[in-house]
Amino acid sequence: MAKRLDPTYAQICGYVPKELARKFKVACATREINQSEALEQMIATWLEQTQLSTTYTSLAELVNAYWDEINTTRIFSDRLEAIRNGEKPTPVEHVYIGSVCGEIELVVELSEKISSKKTRKTTNGV
């Protein structure tokens, strides 16, 4: 099925300088890749770079930014709410949150800023 007819695809458009458009078309032809595929790759890369370059000042802010994706992990919703409200995550939760945003070190760094008073007391090690 052509992407034009595929309901999981949407058309986007924009204007770029003619010389840039020409270079893009030549580069796609040289690499034997169609322009839609090249644009899809570039947009995905750009979105990833701009999302990661966002400066987060708190773990709650990071969790809010990735809320939908983090909600699909094995962290229970009550724990996610607690983390979103400033509670310190466990090491296992660090891994889950970090795997979603691709920045485990950032999750740990932001977690270390949380006051020890808000650290979750656990009896089962999770």
Image (tube, helix red, strand yellow):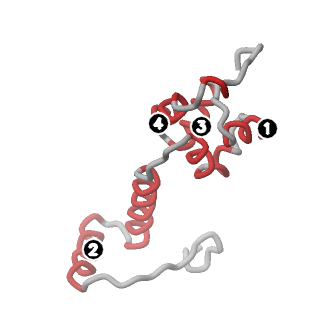
Mark nearer the viewer, 3 or 2 = 3
Q: Establish if 103 lies above or below 23.
A: above
Residue 78 is marked as: 1
* Mark-to-mark CA distance, 3 and 2: 37 Å
Image coordinates for residue 59, horizontal then vertical, percent: 57, 40
Residue shown at the point (57%, 48%) measured from the top left: 61
Query: Do the CB atoms of the residues marked 3 and 1 lie less than 8 Å apart?
Result: no
Mark nearer the viewer, 3 or 4 = 4
* Mark-to-mark CA distance, 2 and 1: 48 Å
Mark 3, residue position: 97
Residue shown at the point (49%, 41%) measured from the top left: 102
- Type of the residue with mark 3: Ile
Residue shown at the point (47%, 38%) measured from the top left: 103
- Type of the residue with mark 2: Phe
Q: Secondary structure at mark 2?
A: helix
- Type of the residue with mark 1: Asp
Image coordinates for residue 53, horizontal then vertical, percent: 40, 51
Residue 38 is marked as: none
* Mark-to-mark CA distance, 4 and 1: 22 Å
Residue 125's image quarter?
Answer: top right
Mark nearer the viewer, 2 or 1 = 1
- Type of the residue with mark 4: Leu
